[in-house]
Image (cartoon, rainbow, N blue to C red):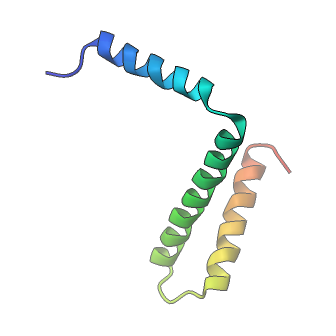
Amino acid sequence: MGPTQELVDAIYRERVLRARRTPIDQKLWAGAELFEAACQIACDGIRHQNPGISEERVQEILRERLALRRRLEGRS
């Protein structure tokens, strides 16, 4: 038996209220930390796909993937 919709709504409401109370500098810092974590995961995947690759090449591939993502979103 899972949580009731009432409980799910209450948890969501509390998360929204907590996010609204969070100062903007903390929100920006959290965004930067999330981006850094995502880049680390992507680099780990690149290393897994390319055993023995140099760190320089890992970073180059990551930059290429980020540039591709920007192009696909219509940003330069």
Image: 29 above or below 52: above
Q: State which quarter of the image contains the N terminus.
A: top left
Figure disc tally? 0
Looking at this rendering, what residue extends furthest in the right direction? 76
Front position in the image: 19 or 2: 19
Q: Residue at x 50, y 89 (%)?
A: 52
User: Could you tell me residue 13's position as x and y percent?
Assistant: 46, 16
User: Could you tell me residue 27's position as x and y percent?
Assistant: 65, 40
Image: 57 above or below 75: below
Image: 63 above or below 9: below
Q: Residue at x 61, y 60 (%)?
A: 36
User: Could you tell me residue 18's position as x and y percent?
Assistant: 53, 26
Q: Residue at x 66, y 52 (%)?
A: 32
Front position in the image: 76 or 25: 25
Q: Is residue 19 left or right of residue 65?
A: left
Front position in the image: 73 or 41: 41
Front position in the image: 10 or 58: 10
User: Could you tell me residue 14's position as x and y percent?
Assistant: 45, 20
Image: 4 above or below 42: above
Looking at this rendering, what residue extends furthest in the top direction? 6
Q: Residue at x 75, y 51 (%)?
A: 70
Res 64 → quadrant: bottom right
Looking at this rendering, what residue extends furthest in the left direction? 1
